[in-house]
Amino acid sequence: MTIADVAKTYEISADTLRYYERVGLLPPVNRTQGGIRDYTEEDCRWVEFIKCMRGAGLSVEALSEYVMLAQQGEATLGQRKQILIGQRERLVRHIEELKKSLERLDFKISNYETLMTASCTKSKGGR
């Protein structure tokens, strides 16, 4: 697949894909004789994984370390697992913070609805 195909498939820019490769989030992609990136199914699985993990809030540094370890093979399974466990714990805390924010927003919206209903009733003059 070309970089344009991958960008379209995963709804990210070609610049983002180049950045992922440059900073080590994406293992080096094979190139054609003309120098054009030629993404394999394995490369696409990495792109999908990276996009998912970035969407979940994982840092570039954590993902770079994970990719580097993955390229070293099975001897790094424990280290990779620890990275993912740590990131999962961070994500769970973030989800809890988001839940609290959502509850507060819901409370505020409910208060506004109550105030607006009361205001509407007053303006009708009890009719």
Image: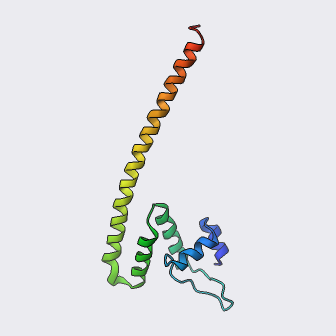
Position above or below: 50 against 118:
below
> Could you say which is closer to the camera, residue 59 or residue 80?
59
Residue in the image at 30% along x and 76% along y: 78
Q: Quadrant of the N terminus?
A: bottom right
Along the line of sight, the residue nearer the viewer: 36 or 101: 101
Question: Which color scheme does this rendered protein use?
Answer: rainbow
Snapshot quadrant of residue 87:
bottom left
- Percent x, y of residue 117: 53, 21
Which quarter shows the C terminus? top right
Q: How many labels does the image show?
A: 0
- Relative to the observer, which residue lies in front, 2 or 114? 114
The residue at the point 59 percent across, 67 percent down is 10
Q: Position of residue 95 (x, y in %)?
A: 40, 52
Which of the 4 quarters of the picture holds residue 126?
A: top right
Where residue 13 appears, x then y in whole percent? 63, 68
- Give the side of residue 81 with respect to residue 98, left or right: left
Q: In this view, does 39 lie to the left or right of 82?
A: right
Task: Tell me: residue 10, above or below residue 76.
Answer: above
Q: Residue reaching furthest bottom?
A: 33
Considering only vertical position in the picture, is 73 above or below 54? below
The x and y percentages for residue 33 are: 66, 92
Q: Is residue 127 left or right of residue 56?
A: right
Tell me if 17 is positioned left or right of 109 in this view.
right
Q: Which residue is drawn at 58% across and 74% down?
A: 17
Q: Residue at x 43, y 83 (%)?
A: 71
